[in-house]
Image: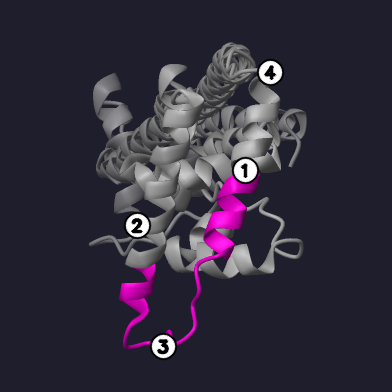
Amino acid sequence: MPKNKEERKSKRQKNIETWAIAFGLIFMFGFWLKYPQFIEYINKERTPIAAPYKPGAQFEMANDPQKTYMQRIGDNYGTYGDSYGSLNTLFSGLAFAALFISLLLQRRELEAQRKELTAQREETKESNKIAENQRKITEQQAHLLAQQIKSVKHQHFNQILFNLLKEKNRRIESMKYKDMDGIEIIKYLALLFIDTIDGISLVGMDDTNRGEYIELIKEETSNYYWSKNEDFGSPFERTLYANYISDLIYYIEDNAEEDYINESIQTLRMFISHDELMCIAWMAIIYPNIEKLVNKYGLLANFRGDEYPYTEVRLQLLFSEKAFEL
């Protein structure tokens, strides 16, 4: 029901109650005021017949000239005295009316209090609604601020990451040996690694001696690595390239958001050529910390196994399946 309709209904009910109270009081007061006249009227119209002790005695007593004025009044109204005792019911009615009026006023007061409580509840609901909206706005602002902070940190992280990747390339370019520069050295060492590992025979290998062949591959590739390192002047160690690769991944682990680590590793993979990937695999056989990172982050995922099937078989013996997963 609309609010204005309820107000009109309440106002109409109050008017009815007010007029009912006024009419009841006027009726009772008028009845009390006219009651004696009403009794006298009844007496004149319906006077009961008395049986006197002798004929004419009643008439003679009523019209005796020797009676005083007060005696004559007593003859006429004395019988009405006890009739006023019946007015006790009238006063009881007035008391009941007063009680009814009191209850009615209390009901009005309770109704007003109920409306006030209803209004307070509505106001409280509205306040709670406003507070809830403010809380949502605050949460949205906090979320937006967190997103902005995250975005700024992300941009800062990417900026540093790309600078580190540039530094990685710079270290490769700084490698020099005779008439070869860094890129040529990387390509040459990658081919040496592939030729070396492909040249290791796996004839006779089965599940019982699998570990022996793995150790054989590690030993031969490690010995060849150190022999060539001496010939080339240890390019990876001299330029700290081996340490730099691991430090770069550690930087991603320590500074990237948890849901952004894989994307950052994917970015790193994009900046590693296939020749460089073969050199990293060679270093992973030598350095356990690099081997751990290769297995953990799938650094061999971009290895072209279709071009180098023999190399793939031997690498799968040395590294876990996760090392080849994106």
Of pointers 3 and 4, the one earlier in the residue sequence: 4
Q: Which residue is mark 4?
A: 179
**CA–CA distance in space, label 2 to label 4:** 30 Å
Q: Which residue is mark 1?
A: 190
Q: Secondary structure at mark 4?
A: loop
Please name which of the two marks, 4 or 1, marks the residue nearer to the observer: 4
Q: Which residue is mark 3?
A: 206
Please name which of the two marks, 3 or 4, marks the residue nearer to the observer: 4
Of pointers 4 and 1, the one earlier in the residue sequence: 4
Three-letter amino acid code at the position of disc 3: Asp
> Residue 121: percent from the left, percent from the top?
48, 29
Of pointers 1 and 3, the one earlier in the residue sequence: 1
State if disc 3 and disc 1 touch (CB < 8 Å). no
Determine whether, in the image, residue 293 is placed left or right of residue 177: left
Determine whether, in the image, residue 92 is placed left or right of residue 156: left
Residue 196 on the magenta segment: yes
Mark 4 is surrounded, within 10 Å at the Cα level, by few (under 14), some (14 to 19) or many (20 or more) other residues, namely few
**CA–CA distance in space, label 1 to label 3:** 28 Å
Please name which of the two marks, 3 or 2, marks the residue nearer to the observer: 2
Of pointers 2 and 4, the one earlier in the residue sequence: 4
Q: Secondary structure at mark 3?
A: loop
State if disc 1 and disc 4 touch (CB < 8 Å). no
Mark 2 is surrounded, within 10 Å at the Cα level, by few (under 14), some (14 to 19) or many (20 or more) other residues, namely some
* Residue 132 drawn above or below residue 156: below
* Residue 163 drawn above or below residue 220: above
* Residue 202 drawn above or below residue 75: below
> Residue 108: percent from the left, percent from the top?
47, 30
Determine whether, in the image, residue 99 is placed left or right of residue 156: left
**CA–CA distance in space, label 3 to label 4:** 45 Å
